[in-house]
Structures are given as structure tokens and as C-alpha cells.
Amino acid sequence: MPEGDTVWLAGHNLRQALAGDELVRTDFRVPRYATTDLSGRRTLDVVARGKHLLWRFERDLTLHTHFMMDGSWHLYRHGQRWRSPGFEARVVLETEKWQAVGFRIPVLDLMPTEREDDVVGHLGPDLLGDDWDPEEATARLEARTEMAIGEALLDQTVMAGVGNVYRCELCFLRGLDPWTPVSEVADHRGVVDLAKRLLEVNRYSARHVTTGVDLPGRTHWVYGRKDEPCRRCGTPIRKADQSSYGSERIVYWCPSCQASQERKGGP
């Protein structure tokens, strides 16, 4: 699932290219909106909200999309070859200069702009948004007392934007076993502030660098490194499913650097 900074960057690039311009052609390739035509409307803004993207058009209309596991938005000049196959396109929005193509977008809704809260109002403070409030995010995290910290970090109602990569890396950098109950985490504000710093530093990049080394194979401490030696202590990195609150959620951790006195529910 894309991280919040990936969605933020997509929104930033789309806004830079399309905001203020009139749509000359639209093609919705989903049954619900197959006959919808937004040509003639101007794009007012494209805003990321956690992992949601909100396109705001003239005349009180918003297109809401969510990447889920595999979705993405691409920008092309007219005539440029698409990087993904056409059958994966769910929506195409065109101006005189650009084509914006949403590939493998599983969540796509049109709604009055005034009703955006229906789809994003439940989210916690956005790590990359204008509404960011570290005290509110900390309070929401602290309230998840019995939830494992590794799962609480993925709870978008706590703070919006952390995905699986940052969940794993945050736990490592804070020395936390992912199955540690939130109530036993010593410094909740430290976790929140580090999450903010990681997304901020990576928001203009296509990669999520947490080690400070932006080189192939060296960008992460633990994520995706099962059985490889920990970069700090040499212990093999472990991998397990932590999915009590939803679909399969794989976590990576170092059992030495992130040791716990008593593992509750983990392997």
C-alpha cells in the first residue's frame, strides 16, 4: 500500500500540471461513471488527505480516489506512451497539455465538494497536511492503549499517512517490538514526531529513505530485509504477519534491537 508521502507527491505533481486548466476530455472506465463527462470544467485543486486524493473541480464537484494496494496516477504529454497497459486505466482526465491517467484505482467516487468529509472526515491529523496537529495525533495514539504499536501506527484515524514501510521503520528506529502495547510505549510524542520527520524528508522523492543512504539496497533498516543481517547488530531480520485488525499486514523487525520482555500475540 502506498505511503502518505507517495500520495502527497502524486497530488503535488497533478496540481502543478492541471490546476487552473480546463478539462477537454474525460474517460471514466468504471460502470458507475461510464457516461460521465467533466469536459469544460476547470481543475481547482488536487489535495492529498492521508492516502486519499481529492480532485476539486468547478461547480462544487470532487473526484475522490484511493490507491489502496496498487493504484497510481500518471502524468503524460499527449502522444506519450503509457507506462502501464491501457486495460488497467480506470479514469483519464485531459487538458490541452496533459493526460492524467489513474491506473488500478479501486476506489473512485464523484461527490459534491461540500461532502468530502464523508470520505476523509474520520481520518486523524494528516502528517503532510495543513491540519497537522502533533498534540492531537499523540493523544489519539495514547488512547489506543491495548493495541499493538505496530498496528496502531497503521490506524489512519490516529494519524493519516503511515503505511507499512514507515510502520516497520518507525518501530525499529524507536527500538520498539511491533507487538508492544501502546500503553507500554515510553514516548508517544517521540514516535509521532519521528513519523512526521520521515514523511517530510521523503515527500519529494519516489523512494522512502529511512537510513539516510539513498542507494539501492541501503534505503531501509528492516523493511523487506527478511533474513538479512541487521545493519546495527547483525541479527537476521525477521518477518511475520500482524493482522489482527484487517487484511494481511507483514511486519519486519530485528529481534535483538527491538527485543521485548513478553511477546503478546506475536511469533
Image (tube, grey):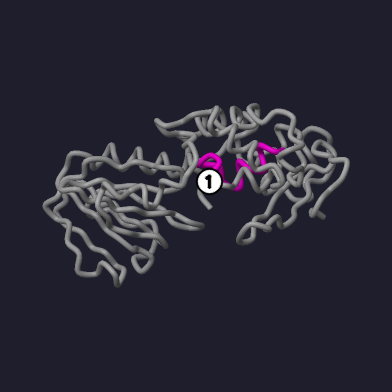
Q: Where is residue 120 in the image (x, y as percent from the top left)?
A: 41, 48
User: Which residues are the magenta region?
Assistant: 157-171
Camera-side residue: 159 or 226?
159
* Residue found at x 64% / y 56%: 249
- Looking at the image, the residue that sits furthest to the right is 261
Q: How many marks?
A: 1
User: Viewed as shown, does residue 52 lie left or right of 241?
Assistant: left
Which quarter of the figure has residue 89? Answer: bottom left
> Which corner quadrant holds the C terminus?
bottom right
Q: Report which quarter residue 9 is drawn in.
A: top left
**Residue 65 vertical placement versus 97 (above, below):** below
Q: In which quarter of the image is residue 186?
A: top right
Where in the figure is residue 243, as x and y percent of width and height? 67, 58
Camera-side residue: 171 or 208? 171
Residue most extreme to the bottom: 31
Residue type of the residue flagged with mark 1: Gln
User: According to the image, label 1 marks what residue?
Assistant: 156
Q: Nearer the viewer, residue 69 or 50?
A: 50
Other residues around mark 1 within 10 Å, as few (<14) / some (14–19) / many (≥20)? some
Viewer-closest of 2 and 217:
2
User: Is 62 part of what is drawn in magenta?
Assistant: no
Q: Is residue 128 left or right of residue 242?
A: left
Name the residue rendered at 47%, 44% in the picture: 123
